[in-house]
Image (spheres, grey):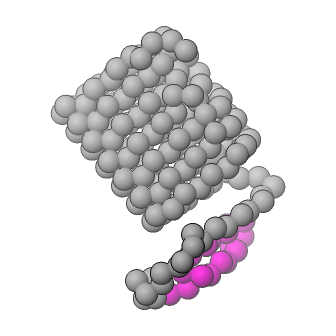
């Protein structure tokens, strides 16, 4: 395994990818990190990221591959999420604004993350669930589904078999 720090970025991975097929740990590899602040998390490959409590002004989450990101107590002003692949993101807490780009087969489960406004763009066959109070811009292409809680003003557009469904109030 290899860790490097460049500026304010920590990178964790294998030193040489050629060894990756030969490494078979008998137990899960775990990293426990304590950071002063976190504004960007980029996770690729397979694995799980969990943060019990996270407070940030602006937070960007990038998930690719088969990763899982779980943030059960998130507070932020602006949240930006970019998901591709088959991974999942599960969020709860409160943000002012969220912008989500979801492509592939991923799952964005933020039905317990209240936001004032949300922009959700879903392509592929993924699914997103959000909780929005004021304004929801929902755009689907492919066969994905956007579900939402709340009574926001909704601007929805769909190409393909994508759907936008209201789930009621919370």
Establish if 160 lies above or below 70.
Answer: above
Q: Residue 159: where, in percent of width, then height? A: 21, 31
Q: Is residue 148 visible?
A: yes
Residue 2, image quadrant:
bottom right
Q: Residue 86: where, in percent of width, then height? A: 36, 53
* Residue 36 belongs to the span the image colors magenta: no
Q: Residue 106: where, in percent of width, then height? A: 38, 47
Q: Residue at x 22, y 39 (%)?
A: 142
Q: Residue at x 40, y 60 (%)?
A: 65
Residue 137, image quadrant:
top left
**Which quadrant, please, contains the N terminus?**
bottom right
Q: Residue at x 76, y 52 (%)?
A: 37
Establish if 114 lies above or below 24.
Answer: above
Q: Is residue 97 visible?
A: no
In this rendering, would 122 be left or right of 158? right
Establish if 38 lies above or below 121.
Answer: below
Q: Residue furthest right?
A: 36
Nearer the observer, 19 or 40 = 19
* Residue 15 belongs to the span the image colors magenta: yes
Q: How many marks?
A: 0
Establish if 31 lies above or below 153.
Answer: below
**Which quadrant, please, contains the C terminus?**
top right
The kind of secondary structure the magenta stretch mainly shows is strand
Q: Which residue range is magenta in the image?
A: 1-16
Q: Residue at x 77, y 58 (%)?
A: 35
Q: Residue furthest front?
A: 26
Nearer the observer, 68 or 99 = 68
Nearer the observer, 79 or 47 = 47
Q: Residue 25: where, in percent of width, then height? A: 53, 79
In this rendering, would 2 be left or right of 86? right
């Amino acid at each position: 395994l290899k860790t490097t720090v460049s500026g304010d970025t920590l990178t964790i991975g294998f030193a040489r990818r050629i060894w990756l097929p030969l490494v078979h740990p008998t137990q899960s590899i775990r990293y426990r990190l304590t950071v002063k602040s976190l504004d960007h998390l980029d996770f690729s490959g397979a694995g799980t990221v969990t943060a019990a409590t996270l407070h940030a002004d602006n937070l960007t989450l990038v998930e690719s591959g088969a990763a899982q990101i779980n943030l059960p107590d998130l507070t932020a002003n602006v949240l930006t999420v970019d998901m591709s692949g088959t991974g999942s993101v599960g969020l709860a807490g409160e943000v002012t604004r969220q912008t989500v780009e979801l492509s592939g087969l991923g799952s964005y489960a933020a039905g317990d993350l209240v936001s004032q406004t949300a922009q959700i763009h879903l392509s592929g066959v993924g699914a997103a669930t959000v909780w929005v109070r004021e304004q929801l811009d929902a755009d689907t292409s492919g066969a994905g589904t956007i579900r939402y809680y709340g009574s926001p003003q909704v601007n929805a557009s769909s190409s393909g078999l994508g759907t936008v469904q209201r789930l009621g109030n919370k």
